[in-house]
Amino acid sequence: MSRETLSFPPTSIPPLEPYLPLTSPSPSSKPHLTLTYATSLDASLTLAPGVRTTLSGPYSKSMTHYLRTRHNAILVGCTTALIDNPALNSRLGSITSLDQQPRPIILDPKGRWDFTEDSQVIRLAAEFKGKGPWVVTKRGGETKERGELLERVGGKFLFLETGEDGRFKWGDVLSVLGEQGVRSVMVEGGGEVINSLLIDPENRLVDSVIITIAPTWLGKGGVVVSPSRQQGQTSQLKLRDVSWQPHGEDVVLCGRILRS
Ligand SMILES: NC(=O)C1=CN([C@@H]2O[C@H](COP(=O)(O)OP(=O)(O)OC[C@H]3O[C@@H](n4cnc5c(N)ncnc54)[C@H](O)[C@@H]3O)[C@@H](O)[C@H]2O)C=CC1
Ligand SMILES: Nc1nc(O)c(N)c(N[C@@H]2O[C@H](COP(=O)(O)O)[C@@H](O)[C@H]2O)n1
């Protein structure tokens, strides 16, 4: 896979700044959570489950790589890790040190992510082009061999209990990351991760939303962002403080969730 070098123009940074984590956050507050992903006009992340689909054009892609440098961590679900074999680092040419790279976090309660030393995120960590991943799992989701491989590249397992639905509570995920010194996390997807975050009953965990909208329809049958309506829910889940910025042929929507 090609390892391109990207650049993001400094003039494009100011409109994003209000939605980004503070550079000196209070250590006691919960980590800043930015929800960010690329979607089609019909709210699809991919053409079909199991199919990695490129939506971002070159300009919005470089924005995503800039956003990765502005967060301590980047989080995806284990299906994304399995299907995409993602790099989860920033390939901006301006990066000069590993400190500027985000920590990859994979939510994997059942230990389904079967990573090896050939997995991109592991290989890049071994080459100091990215940080070693932290895999959030339930006790029993780890193996000794995988634990050793993670340790060799500076990663580790973090353990959490799941609820009856087999999921972690998002508040618990942020607490465990906060205890590890993470002050900001960029949640990239996939669909289950995003939808489970958006149905969080209090909606107090997502600090900002930065969505790339690509000028394409993927059609029915893809992985869609559409959170289940909660029992008795009559209100819409809306954004406030909205701004729209063109990035090449894509448009980037920034906002914060409006709390009722
Ligand atoms: N267009 C875009 O920006 C992005 C697209 N994708 C695409 O999304 C697709 C994968 O999406 P999905 O199938 O929905 O899977 P997913 O990537 O959301 O992973 C789902 C898995 O993550 C774990 N998980 C999710 N939420 C959890 C929670 N609250 N607690 C504990 N574990 C949790 C579970 O093991 C679950 O089976 C891939 O095809 C990928 O290419 C992924 C990220 C961004
Ligand atoms: N911003 C964005 N645009 C797209 O078109 C995408 N398909 C994604 N996908 C996310 O980025 C991850 C891949 O990252 P690497 O380039 O391998 O570092 C992928 O796993 C999704 O999380 N994002």
Image (cartoon, rainbow, N blue to C red):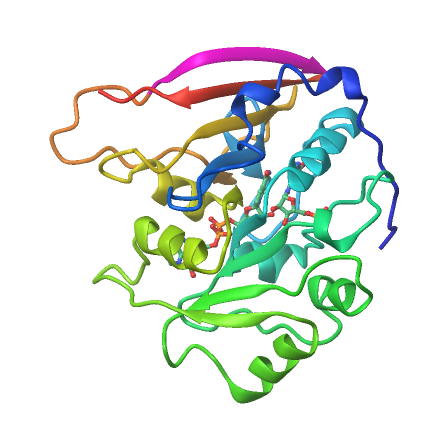
The quadrant holding residue 103 is: bottom right
Residue 196 in picture, x, y percent from top left: 35, 44
Give the answer, above or below, for where 135 lies relative to 234.
Answer: below
Q: Is residue 208 left or right of residue 249?
A: left
Give the answer, above or below, for where 64 lies relative to 59.
Answer: below
Which residues, given as a range, are shown in magenta?
A: 238-247
Residue 133 in sight from this viewpoint = yes
Residue 31 in picture, x, y percent from top left: 44, 44
The quadrant holding residue 213 is: top right
Q: Main secondary structure of the magenta part?
A: strand
Give the answer, above or below, for where 226 lies relative to 142.
Answer: above
Residue 144 in picture, x, y percent from top left: 53, 88
Q: Nearer the viewer, residue 17 or 239?
A: 17
Tell me the residue at 79%/57% (across/down). 129
Residue projecting furthest to the bottom = 144
Residue 248 in sight from this viewpoint = no
Judge whether residue 25 is colored magenta. no
Q: Quadrant of the N terminus?
A: bottom right
Residue 130 in picture, x, y percent from top left: 73, 57
Q: Is residue 212 left or right of residue 159?
A: right
Tell me the residue at 27%/22% (across/down). 259
The quadrant holding residue 26 is: top left
Q: Nearer the viewer, residue 30 or 6?
A: 30
Tell me the residue at 25%/59% (across/down). 165
Q: Is residue 33 left or right of residue 127?
A: left
